[in-house]
Amino acid sequence: MLKKIFYKLFKDKIYSKKLSQLDKFEKKYKKIISDIHLSILEKKELNFLHSGHCGDLIYSFAVIKKLSITHKCNLYVGLNKVVGNNYEKHPSGNIYINKRMYDLLLPLMKKQKFLNIVKEHNNETIDINLDLFRELPINYIFNSPRWYFQITGEQVDLSKPYMDAEEHKQIKNKIIVHRTFRFRNNFINYKFLKNSKELLFIGLEDEYKDLKLDVPSLQLYNPEDFYEVAQLIKSCKFFLGNMSLFYPMAEALKVPRLLEACPEFPVVQPVGVDAYDFYFQPHFEKWFNYLNTKF
């Protein structure tokens, strides 16, 4: 009897939540989605807004690049939007994109030929708000580039590159490593790489020092901006990292790559050739050795 009562209460709670989500969509978001759909159908020039983290912005390139085939695409970046909670040791604190991060990202954005205009948002009229996925009454725990599929109704072949960068002029054929304090996988460690001589770390100094405890041979390089980061990744033997800003670059460039996947928040999945992820140590070592041998 208690089991039946509990089941009914649980079922009623789920049904009530679904009704609430539907009501929220009907009252606010149905028209927004419809307006975006009509803008894509009727306009030749589209203004996009993105105020999220830099990595999320990179993932939106896939949809923007496809729409640029038939439209002029202008990207406006909203600065200083508050996250609402502090990411562990995030360089922007509780802000999605601050002016410093924008200035680092701007040279990379300006290199993308599919972007007609790239500017800070200053009250321009927006056709497609790419921040919308955070507000919609949906569960967005799925592959990050696809968030923007649901906003625009576009479908993109994610096995193909959707970001451009030239190769680095001096540094080539390194294993580029990036590991933040956020989104770490506690099931694995990097100690088996302690004697590797090809590893080049890009990221914050405290992140580098932390990983160097396990990998004494690790070297640090400080790029000038995020376009130079993209050049380093474009020129690498392969990329190894967790799901922070530089992995989205590797994914967008479609270089050989290995993702330290995050079991608690699985919103990034490698797509395409020579792209692998792992949760557990034997698989980490297996795919690292495979890519290291292949390239």
Image (cartoon, grey):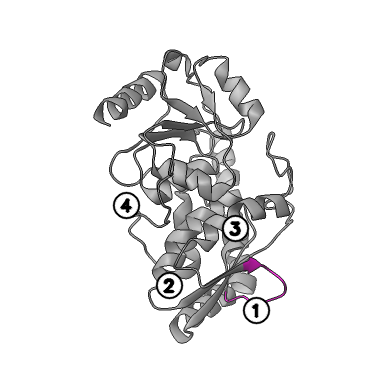
Magenta span: predominant SS is loop
Mark 3 crowdedness (10 Å alpha carbons): few <14, some 14-19, many ≥20: some
Q: Residue at x 32, y 58 (%)?
A: 157
Task: Look at label 2 and name its amino acid.
Answer: Ser
- Counting from the top left corner in percent of width and height, residue 95 is at 72, 49
Task: Look at label 3 and name its amino acid.
Answer: Leu
CA separation in Å, label 1 and label 4:
32 Å
Q: Which residue is mark 4?
A: 159
State the SS at label 1. loop
Q: Nearer the viewer, mark 3 or mark 2?
A: 3
Mark 1 crowdedness (10 Å alpha carbons): few <14, some 14-19, many ≥20: few
* For marks 3 and 2 on the same chain, the one whose residue lies earlier in the sequence: 2
* For marks 1 and 4 on the same chain, the one whose residue lies earlier in the sequence: 1
CA separation in Å, label 2 and label 1:
18 Å
State the SS at label 4. loop
Magenta region: which residues?
A: 119-127
The quarter of the picture where residue 154 lies is bottom left
Q: Are marks 2 and 1 in contact (CB under 8 Å)?
A: no
Say if residue 173 shows up in the picture: yes
Which quarter of the rendering shows the N terminus? Answer: top right
- The disc label shown at residue 106, or none: 3
Task: Look at label 4 and name its amino acid.
Answer: Ser
